[in-house]
Image (tube, grey):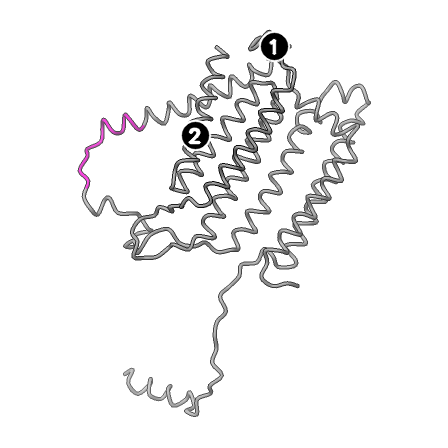
Amino acid sequence: MIPFVFIAFIVLTVISACVVLWSNNVLYAAFSLLLTFFGIAALYVLVGADFIAITQLLVYVGGILVLLLFGVMLTNQNGNKENGKNDIIGTNTNRLIGFAVAFGLFALLFFTFAKANFVNIQSNLFESIETFSTTQNIGVLLMTDFVLPFEVSGVLLMATLIGAAYLSSKTKV
Amino acid sequence: MTMLTDFGYILLFIIAAIVFVAVILFLAKLIRPNRPNEEKLTTYESGEEPDGNANVRFNIRFYVVALIFILFDVEIIFLFPWATVFGNKRLIAETDGLWGWFSLVEMFVFVGVLLIGLAYAWIKGHLDWVRPEVKTTEYESKIPTSLYDKINQKYSQ
């Protein structure tokens, strides 16, 4: 059962990622990116990283994608009343640099993973993933050993909030 | 109960939601009469005739709201593992209730620090809506307004 779910989510992730790459319509690409993020979250669950999966869902699917769509809508220059269609069509530029960056990242990740020793995991693939939840351990550790970094990260978030609001405001006070 | 079983329930809920929507839409398609005309197919815009497309640039003010939303979204990430353990009965019993109070106070401090940031942005007016400036002319008319009132009175009868 689990291998089928695993393969289904891999197919979902790969297909939606390909749509992101090949679609010229910006909104189609953005919504396919939503499916890609969702598929990756499901893959995180299947490797036993439940907290990372929920972070992926909350921040990337819920937050970053909204910001991305907002970015498209806020900077859109093509809105005119003559054009009856609502599509926002993107264009391909700098293909060579794009391919170079993508290939470089792929090579970096590929060689990093090729050097890692996955023999223990591969020997009992799909059987070893019956793991228990990590979220509660993270919660206990946040409140005990890492309570100071936790509060400091709150201060960091506050600084980011003030900085973001200040930078994007028109009137500098 | 393992983690994967719990997430299996979530997957079942997701599948059920998709199937439910698909079945309802398919049944509606079977039952309803299908007689489209041009009036029915236009975009509904609160009863107005649609003018142009929906593809206009949004007000930049929304961006600040979106950024603040992302920050509170990240805050939720910290709240989430805390919420699973702060009411843990075993931990509270082992520490004579200290665990619950300590984690509650810590989380209030954390949220309070972020609320200070929100209050700052609010007081400084970063959350205020930017209104378009109303242009007033410097020109002062030599004709007093009482003359206009007289004309209005004369012709309003």
Chain at numbered mark 1: A
Residue A155 against residue A42 in the figure, above or below: below
Chain at numbered mark 2: A
In the picture, measured across the screen, residue A168 lies left or right of residue A27, that is right
Tell me the magenta residue range: B25-36
Residue closer to the observer: B92 or B8? B8
Identify the secondary structure beneath mark 2.
Answer: helix
Q: Residue A128 lies in what quarter of the image?
A: top right
In the picture, measured across the screen, residue B123 lies left or right of residue B146, that is right
Identify the secondary structure beneath mark 1.
Answer: loop
Determine the residue positioned at 58% across, 44% down.
B69
Instruction: Give the amino acid type for the residue marked by disc 2 in the picture.
Output: Ser
Determine the residue positioned at 27% across, 29% down.
B28
Task: Say if the magenta span includes residue B30.
Answer: yes
Q: Residue B54: where, in percent of width, then height?
A: 36, 51
Residue closer to the observer: B79 or B67? B67
* Residue A86, numbered label: none
Residue B11 against residue B75 in the figure, above or below: above
Determine the residue positioned at 52% across, 32% down.
A103
Q: Earlier in the sequence, mark 1 or mark 2?
A: 2
* Residue A128, numbered label: 1
Does the rendering let one see residue B1? no
Q: Can you identify the residue that label 2 sits on?
A: A16
Q: Residue A133: where, in percent of width, then height?
A: 64, 18
Instruction: Give the amino acid type for the residue marked by disc 1 in the picture.
Output: Ser
Quarter containing the C terminus of chain A = bottom right
